Image (tube, helix red, strand yellow):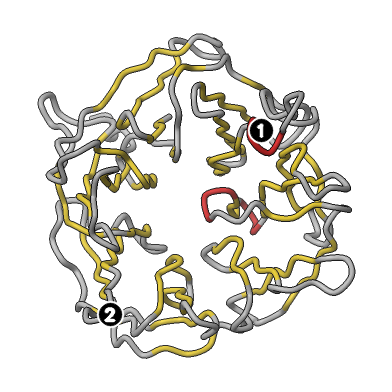
Amino acid sequence: LLLGGPAGLRLLMATGRGSPDWMTGVLTLAGRLGGSPAVSQIAPVQGGVVALLGSAAAKADPAVGDVYFVPVSSPAGAGPRLIGRADDLAVAVRGPDIWLERTGGPHRPDLVWLVSESGRRLSPVLRLRGQVLLGDTVRGLLTQGQSGQGARLVNPASGASRPAGVPGDAVVVAAGPQDVAWQPTACRGPCSLHITSLRTGADTVIGLPPRTSPDGEPAQAAFGPGGRLAVAMATANHEDRTTVMSVYVTGQHGHRLIRLPGGPIPPLAAWPGDPSVHLPDIVSVRWAGSGLWIVTTDGLETQVAYWTGTGRLGVLAPMSGAADTFAVAAGRPAAPAG
């Protein structure tokens, strides 16, 4: 497991099968930004993870950071290697490669290109024309505009784009290889969540539990096996203050949301006094195989929970320090014997 945050990239490794004990190490990434380096984004790829290293002191808007490939099983002496500079990344839906994005400003174009884990460019440099990269899908790169332009699918070879079947004023909650989850900006009456198939265009509408809403960050929702969606949801009281954070998953037929058993993840219950100040946050919801990993933090401590798909959550002991992003990494398959 890898946790990214203000302290850099932390590696957590189980000491034995089924053991609750974890060994923690810190992987140092020598970013060139200066100031206080922080891992703002990590994603698993074949043989390791890619990490986007930003800086708390960066004044550029947007702030361009260093992107590293971090192997988790490699020959002795092989460590993290710089593969590019970008302010966003997405793992290719086909193969182990990585899309890098450099978001433009008022006088700079928005660019995206594909690189290998060694940093070699594998595609033309494409202009997104005011769109922001959300992820790679079976139908092309999924992007969304900043000013009500709607989500679009971009051909990774030519750069040509077409509508993705999502309204221009929608809030995209999660983007998967085959589906996109979104919510209308304004709800009249009970709010709902839409899941649109990028293959067929079919739209599934799911009613939300009373007084709940998606928490809003891309890292807080993810599509998993079979297109199953997991999403962090905030529940508000009658004063519209968030009192608890929970994770919900879609049922087997995708028409309803089910809260994970076991209640809120420690330490996510509201504190006495002012919960709007003290309530910890779910910072990452990610699938690994058929299981779901959840990371929470209150700014001082981080806690990790795991759900196998059945039964109650397994919750690990709290760890000191904050985490902002999370990934589960696996090494390369072992070479065949003989």
Q: Is residue 235 above or below residue 298?
A: below
Q: In this view, does 137 lie to the left or right of 159?
A: right
The mark found on residue 174 in the picture is none
Callout 2 secondary element: loop
Amino acid on which the number 2 mark rests in the picture: Pro
Q: Quadrant of the C terminus?
A: top left
- Tell me the quarter of the picture where residue 311 sits: top right
Q: Which residue is drawn at 80% across and 66% down?
A: 192
The residue carrying mark 2 is 106
Q: Position of residue 82 (x, y in %)?
A: 14, 46
Going 51% across and 21% down the picture, which residue do you hit? 301
Task: Give the residue at mark 1.
Answer: 279
Considering only vertical position in the picture, is 128 above or below 328?
below
Q: Quadrant of the N terminus?
A: top left
- Crowding at mark 2 (Cα within 10 Å: few <14, some 14-19, many 20+): few
Q: Is residue 227 above or below residue 9?
A: below
- Relative placement, left or right, of 263 versus 23 is right
Asked whether 86 or 253 is in front, the reply is 86
Residue 35 location, x and y as percent? 19, 38
Residue at 37%, 57% (x, y): give it.
91
Horizontal side of residue 46 vs 281, given as left or right: left
Q: Is 175 drawn above or below residue 240 in the view shown? A: below
Q: Which of marks 1 and 2 is nearer the N terminus?
A: 2
Report the side of 282 relative to 251 (left or right). Answer: left
Measured from the top left, where is residue 53 in percent x and y?
26, 44
Q: In the image, what residue occupies the spot 57% across and 14% down?
A: 317
Task: Give the class, few, some or many, for how many residues have Cα within 10 Å of label 1's Cα (few <14, many ≥20).
Answer: many
Looking at the rendered structure, the secondary structure element under dot 1 is loop
Q: Position of residue 52 (x, y in %)?
A: 29, 48
Q: Which amino acid does label 1 sit on?
A: Leu
